[in-house]
């Protein structure tokens, strides 16, 4: 039976935390998450809790592994959905947990929330994340290919190496139309939510916060891409 639950907690607003996520937290012996993630559960945490940071990630995963082996119920809170730029990948890569010991509870991702705000059907869109160490030439080439094929693109920028400004600059250098429509959803679902609509060339002069989703839509003329 799985004793580690990786729980998706949504894009930020407490209303987007699912009942099944709250139930998992209520039943846990140990709850691990970033400070703002733990704050979404002011009444549900009765067991031990550990504040997760970038610096203590590996040590905390080891503690979680030890707790699972001791037959304790452990919850690891993951913003958005654990399976997209979330903690599921990190847990699997750690090699500390068997597949049988892991249960994933999905959550509403920021990409889903952004698509909903913009009334975009995203079943044919291409999704990219450049968080962490994923800003590679291979990923950039895939982004270029998706753009040139005319796909709507949802992506999570990296706020150090591949910001919305960097992305716009990169695409323009590959020959993208400067008038291509771009949306940037910042702090989606939160009180300071902001949605900016602009073009690739205009995005180059703007700065955005770390919690943002970038959406690229093609400019069309009579059903054909303007390239």
Image (cartoon, rainbow, N blue to C red):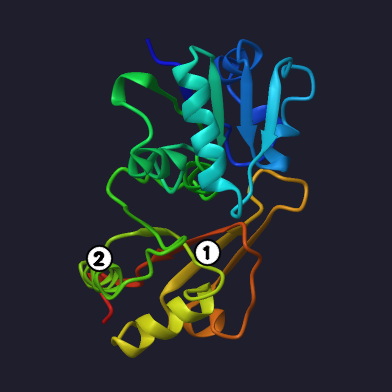
Report x, y in % for residue 102: 38, 23
Q: Which residue is mark 2?
A: 146
Q: Residue at x 29, y 86 (%)?
A: 174
* Disc 1 element: strand
Q: Residue at x 51, y 46 (%)?
A: 58
- Mark 2 nearby-residue class (10 Å; few <14, some 14–19, many ≥20): some
Q: Which residue is mark 1?
A: 183
49 sits left or right of 103 in the view: right
Quarter of the image for residue 14 reads top right
The C terminus appears in which quarter of the rendering? bottom left
Instruction: Look at the picture and state if 204 lies above or below 100.
Output: below
Can residue 7 be seen in this snapshot?
Answer: no
Instruction: Look at the picture and state if 154 lies above or below 37.
Output: below
Report x, y in % for residue 23: 60, 12
* Disc 2 element: helix
- The numbered dot on residue 10 is none
Specify which label sits upstream in the sequence, 2 or 1: 2
């Amino acid at each position: 039976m799985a004793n580690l639950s990786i729980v998706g907690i949504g894009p930020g607003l407490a209303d987007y935390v699912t009942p099944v996520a709250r139930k998992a937290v209520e039943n846990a012996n140990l709850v691990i998450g970033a400070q703002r993630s733990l704050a979404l559960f002011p009444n549900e945490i009765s067991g031990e809790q550990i504040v997760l940071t970038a610096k203590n990630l590996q040590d905390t995963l080891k503690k979680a592994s030890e707790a699972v082996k001791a037959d304790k119920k452990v919850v690891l809170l993951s913003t958005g959905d654990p399976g997209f730029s979330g903690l599921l990948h990190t847990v699997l890569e750690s090699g500390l947990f068997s597949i049988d010991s892991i249960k994933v509870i999905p959550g509403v991702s920021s990409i889903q929330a952004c698509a909903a705000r913009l009334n975009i059907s995203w079943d044919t869109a291409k999704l990219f994340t450049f968080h962490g160490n994923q800003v590679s030439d291979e990923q950039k080439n895939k982004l270029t290919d998706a753009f040139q094929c005319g796909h709507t693109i949802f992506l999570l920028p990296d706020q150090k190496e591949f910001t919305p400004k960097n992305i716009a600059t990169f695409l323009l250098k590959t020959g993208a139309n400067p008038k291509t429509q771009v949306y940037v959803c910042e702090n989606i679902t939160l009180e300071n939510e902001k949605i900016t609509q602009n073009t690739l060339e205009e995005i180059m002069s703007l700065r955005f916060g770390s919690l943002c989703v970038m959406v690229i839509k093609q400019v069309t003329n009579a059903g054909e891409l303007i390239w």
